[in-house]
Image: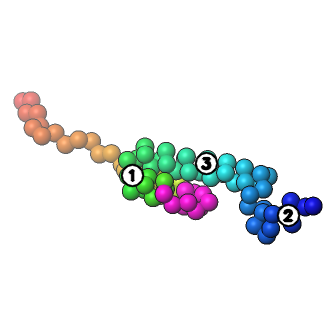
Amino acid sequence: MNYFNQMGANAWITHPAIMYPVLAWLVVWKGLALWYAARRGQKAWYVILLIVNTLGILEIIYIFAVAKRSDTPTPKQPPVPINPPAAKV
């Protein structure tokens, strides 16, 4: 008897050939997103990514949209001296 007919209509979800690649997909994206959020000190994003499971969609959006946006460097300006040195005469 066929595995899918024996287990029912939702058997494809629990079939090892489907389940293990999906699980690997989830672990990789969730791990990357949590690592980025922790490195940036974004506690709210970390908790949201840890709790919400969207099959990697939220994690991918975070990595490529939110994390990239906060990676843009701001131009550094030279520090303004508090007490400028006296001019030599």
Quadrant placement of the C terminus: top left
Q: Position of residue 88 (x, y in %)?
A: 9, 29
Q: Earlier in the sequence, mark 2 or mark 1?
A: 2
- At 44% from the left and 52% from the top, the residue drawn is 46
* Secondary structure category for the residue under label 2: helix
Residue occupied by mark 3: 27
Q: Which residue is mark 1?
A: 42
Indicate the position of residue 16 as horizontal and vertical percent values.
77, 51
Foreground pick, 26 / 67: 26
**Residue at 23% over, 41% down:** 79
Q: Nearer the viewer, residue 8 or 74?
A: 8
How far apart are the two marked residues, 2 and 1, measured between alpha carbons?
47 Å
Q: Residue at x 48, y 57 (%)?
A: 51
Can I make out residue 22 in this image?
Answer: yes
User: Mark 3 or mark 1, which is nearer the start of the sequence?
Assistant: 3
Front one among 20 and 32: 20
Q: Position of residue 65 (x, y in %)?
A: 51, 59
CA distance for labels 1 and 3: 20 Å
Mark 3 Cα shell of 10 Å, populated few (<14), some (14-19), many (≥20): some
Is residue 71 visible to the viewer in this orientation of the structure?
no
Amino acid type, label 1: Gln
| Horizontal relation, residue 67 to residue 85: left or right | right
For the residues carrying marks 3 and 2, which lies nearer the camera in this image?
2
The answer to which of 79 and 1 lies nearer the viewer is 1
Amino acid type of the residue that numbered disc 2 sits on in the rendered structure? Gln
Q: Could you tell whether 7 is left or right of 59 in the image? A: right
Residues in magenta? 51-60
User: In the rendering, which numbered label is found on residue 6?
Assistant: 2
Number of residue marks = 3
Q: Which quadrant of the figure contains the N terminus? A: bottom right
Label 1 SS: loop
